[in-house]
Amino acid sequence: MNKLVRNSVIAGVIAIVVLVLVINSCTVISPNERGVKVTLGQVEGDVIQPGMQFHAPFVSKIRKFRLEPKTYEVSFSCGSDGAITKDMQTVGSTVAVRYVYDERRIMDIVTRYLNDAVIQSAMRDNVKASLKETVGQYSIYDLVEKQNEVTGKVADAMLTRMSDYPIDISQTTITNWDWSDDFDKQIKETANRAQEVKKAEQDLKLAEQQAQKQVKEAEAKKAAIEQEAEAALIKAQKEAEAKKVEADALAYYNAKVAQNYQVEIKLKELEIELERAKKWDGRQVPSYIPLTAAGGIVNLPEAKQ
């Protein structure tokens, strides 16, 4: 019985040892990870791709690096750690850097920078330097108005300063600005004044629009009146031309009537002459009456019938 128990214990110990050995000699690398094999402090081979990897237990291990975006955030107060503006005002801020390991340079992380903490320490120093360098180019008032521009310059400076590190920075943002309470009060007052100015500008713009509308309405009304007047003038001219044509036609008609009347009179005279000619007996009948010496009237002989 004792022997059976002893054998069972030995078998259990062996199983545990085997299990520990298996666990320490097998590493699974997921699709979003890459690995580096380190044996007794020395890097061996190339970057290990996803899959099951076996290695000597205890003397070798696989360091894994996740290829997914990370965010490193660092805050600076507006005290001694803050950045100084061009007009000698101290401001603080919170800067967030989003980055990912450069898969082509993972070996550098292990051989040159040892671990991610070294990279983040360098990132903090470079964020601080980039922020102070950029903020020093602006007054505190410009800083309030041009925050997007300042953020863009800090991001560009970070890309330059961190270019030698085995990471890819996708975005650098300044999520918070911090300044003194007195200046914060000034900002609010300035914002209120700016709002009042903006409202006055909007009121002026609205008044200008109303004035322009009235001018356009007046111009449209004037144009309509001019069109009506022009139409009336054209109508009057047409009517005058029509009346002139009518008068000319009437005058022409009257002239023709008078001409026809003269012709008829002439025809009547000719008819009378013709009748006389028909009744003439060949003798000349004087067309005048001779006077006597005494001024008496001479009786003419009666014409024969």
Image (cartoon, rainbow, N blue to C red):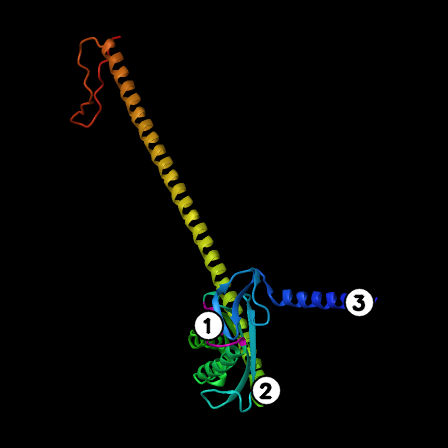
Q: Nearer the viewer, mark 2 or mark 3?
A: 3
The 10 Å Cα crowd at callout 1, few under 14, some 14 to 19, many 20 or more, is: some
Local packing at callout 3 (Cα closer than 10 Å; few below 14, some 14-19, many 20+) is few
Which portion, as a residue range, is magenta? 105-116
Q: Amino acid at mark 1?
A: Asp
Q: Main secondary structure of the magenta part?
A: helix
Q: Which residue is mark 2?
A: 185
Q: Is residue 168 visible?
A: no
Q: Which label's residue is closer to the chain start, 2 or 1?
A: 1
Q: Percent x, y for residue 16?
A: 70, 67
Q: Residues within 10 Å of mark 2 (few under 14, many from 20)?
A: few
Q: Which residue is mark 3?
A: 3
Secondary element at tag 3: helix
* Closer to us: 114 or 24: 24
Q: Quadrant of residue 18?
A: bottom right
- For marks 3 and 1, the one nearer the N-term is 3
Q: Residue 53's x, y, as percent?
A: 56, 62
Query: Label 2, label 3: how many angstroms apart (C-alpha)?
Result: 86 Å
Residue 115 pos. (x, y %): 53, 76
Residue under the image location 48 percent in, 56 percent down: 221
Q: Residue 30: say if magenta.
A: no
Mark 1 lies on residue: 108
Secondary structure type for disc 2: helix
Foreground residue among 104 and 4: 4
Mark 2 residue type = Lys
Q: Is residue 292 left or right of residue 90?
A: left
Residue 13: percent from left, percent from top:
72, 68
Label 3 to label 1, Cα distance in Å?
56 Å
Q: Nearer the viewer, mark 2 or mark 1?
A: 1
